[in-house]
Image: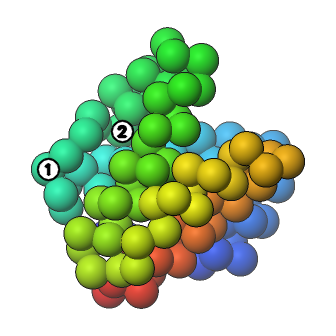
Amino acid sequence: MTNRSIVMMIVLSIVTFGIYWIYWYVVFQSELKRETGEGFGGLGHLLMTIITFGIYGLYWNFAAGKRLAQQGTDDWSIIYFILPFIGGLGILNPFFMQHQANNLS
């Protein structure tokens, strides 16, 4: 998995008005699929999220946490699933997931 700076992710997310977040979502899923062999590819993943009006994205938060745990990190899957329901804190999930992925290397 690619190491990414969390600070740079935050800056790019703000500067691009969230477009970087969508890019990260697709690329991260592609990397996760390459590592685990599970789930859709990046674009298929994005398409499923759009088609299901974000419901698949909620499931993906949980599944991505499980897949990261399979790679050797702590299992934060429940946290990733619950955060979107707590005042929109799900926006933090990409940064937490990337932090875990960075610690794998």
Residue position marked by numbered label 2 in the rendering: 42
Q: In this view, does 66 lie to the left or right of 99?
A: left
**Secondary element at tag 2:** helix
Mark 1 or mark 2, which is nearer the start of the sequence?
1
Residue 94 in which image quadrant: bottom right
Q: Disc 2 to disc 1, how far (Cα)?
A: 12 Å
**Secondary element at tag 1:** loop
Residue 15 in which image quadrant: bottom right
Q: In this view, does 86 lie to the left or right of 19?
A: right
Neighbours of disc 1 within 10 Å: few (<14), some (14-19), many (20+): few
Residue shown at 68%/54% (left/top)? 83
Residue shown at 46%/38% (left/top)? 59
In this figure, which colouring scheme has been used for the structure? rainbow
Q: Residue 104 carries which label?
A: none
Residue 35 position in % (x across, y down):
19, 61
Residue 80 position in % (x across, y down):
56, 57
Q: Which amino acid does label 1 sit on?
A: Gly
Residue closest to the eye, 66 or 23:
66
Residue 5 position in % (x across, y down):
59, 78
Q: Is residue 2 above or below residue 93?
A: below
**Residue sitting at the far top:** 51
Q: Is residue 23 left or right of residue 90?
A: left
Q: Would you say residue 9 is visible in this rendering?
A: yes
Residue closest to the eye, 15 or 42:
42
Residue closest to the eye, 69 or 4:
69
Q: In which quarter of the image is the C terminus?
A: bottom left
Residue position marked by numbered label 1 in the rendering: 37
Residue shown at 27%/80% (left/top)? 72
Q: Would you say residue 4 is visible in this rendering?
A: no
Q: What residue type is labelled 2?
A: Gly
Q: In which quarter of the image is the N terminus?
A: bottom left
